[in-house]
Amino acid sequence: MEHSALLARLGTKALVVTGAHSARANGSLADVEAALRKEGIAYAIYDKVPPNPGIADAREGAAAAIEAHADFVIGIGGGSPLDAAKAIAVLARNQLDDERLFQNAFPNAPLPIAAVPTTAGTGSEVTQYSILTNARLETKTSIASESIFPKVAFLDAAYTASLPLRVTVNTAVDALSHAVEGFLSVKATAFSDGMAISALNLLGAALPKLSGDIGPELRQSLLDASSLAGMVIAQAGTTAGHAMGYSLTFFKDIDHGRANGLTMAAYLEFLADQNEPKLSRLLAALGIPHLGALKELLDSLLGEREGVSLAEIKKYASISIKAKNIGNAPKKMAEGDLVAIYRASMKIV
Ligand code: NAP
Ligand code: FE
């Protein structure tokens, strides 16, 4: 409420983009509506964004934005509604077929975006990415454009208090994967590394405490780490973990953060075998003595691995190797490397 004037700078008619339930339950939608009323901003609500939204969801939301004559968009929720809000902001102003949507050059500037995260993991509130399920390519495809950076993000860890333990863990592992992959990306800089180290410090302390009751201080730590790690990938991009995770989500319906976490230890072991020099700094920032201890921590957070067949693994590797972010890995990766990482990470059935 106290920051409602920041919304008034974005426009006069808002489309609020959110999921089906949680924004009503955790108070974030009511707070945004109160702020909009205070500023005299008219608004419509599009509350149909599913987890892992697809291109069709974004098109439906864009139609709602056009119908409401919205001149800005407010995303409330986890990464799914925030990413949908970004794609809606693009499509409300641009008629683009699916291919051109992912070419990142839009004739008209997207609508301005405000973001209210209610999970602590994706960092989407501070990134230029919108990641959409792409049924034709059987994976997730990213829009990456500076024009969809949210103009303003409102971070209130109280909204995350209602997250079930499973979602808390999976989203925290997503934040970890952003810090880890961004820190070990060829695009990493001294600036992104500073934020990655801060995120890793916070996550190293928080992750072992994620069981049972999670108090407000821990929630705050996770949200801070998530946004810091989001700023890391905004600069340095993600790498193999995300590329490989998309197949696990697309074909096995595994939550995004968990999907990244499943292959993390084997990916880091691959890099250790190649003498990756930054690995020791990464472990030190987490406060973890060696890679084996990180693997144990991940095992305790993720529990039993899902079963996949070797034929499935070969298919996933053939898709993941084509993902753009594979090129950000600090060592060159071949399709066979991805097969080996999947094999070491999953239960083979
Ligand atoms: P999510 O798919 O947005 O939400 C998962 C579930 O959590 C939904 O059922 C949601 O319910 C519920 N939920 C959200 N906030 C809640 C709260 N405060 N209390 C209780 N339940 C709550 O999950 P996510 O992991 O945050 O986002 C994943 C998506 O983000 C993926 O599509 C991934 O590809 C993308 N991603 C984007 C970036 C980026 O840079 N843009 C980075 C990483 C990942 P409702 O549906 O009812 O809201
Ligand atoms: Fe992610």
Image (tube, rainbow, N blue to C red):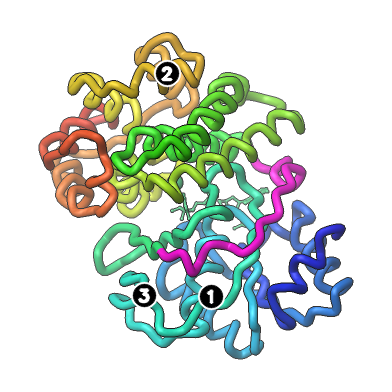
- The alpha-carbon separation of the residues under discs 3 and 1 comes to 14 Å
Pick the residue in front: 118 or 342.
118
Residue sticking out furthest to the top = 289
Q: Answer above or below: position of 70 versus 280.
A: below
Q: Where residue 132 sits: x, y (%)? A: 41, 63
Which residue is denoted by mark 3 in the rendering?
105
The kind of residue tagged 2 is Leu
Q: Earlier in the sequence, mark 1 or mark 2?
A: 1
- The alpha-carbon separation of the residues under discs 1 and 2 comes to 39 Å
Residue at screen point 15% across, 49% down: 318
Q: Does dot 2 land on a helix, a strand or a loop?
A: helix
Give the number of the mark in front: 3 or 2.
Answer: 3
Q: Does dot 1 land on a helix, a strand or a loop?
A: helix
Q: Answer above or below: position of 138 versus 173.
A: below
Label 2 packing within 10 angstroms: few (<14), some (14-19), many (20+): many
Q: Where residue 49 sits: x, y (%)? A: 55, 66
In the image, is the residue at mark 2 within 8 Å of ligand 2 by its beta carbon? no
| Residue 154 is inside the magenta segment | yes
* Residue 17, quarter of picture: bottom right
The kind of residue tagged 3 is Ala
The kind of residue tagged 1 is Ala
Which residue is denoted by mark 1 in the rendering?
89
Which residue is denoted by mark 2 in the rendering?
283
Residue 312 is left or right of residue 244, and the answer is left
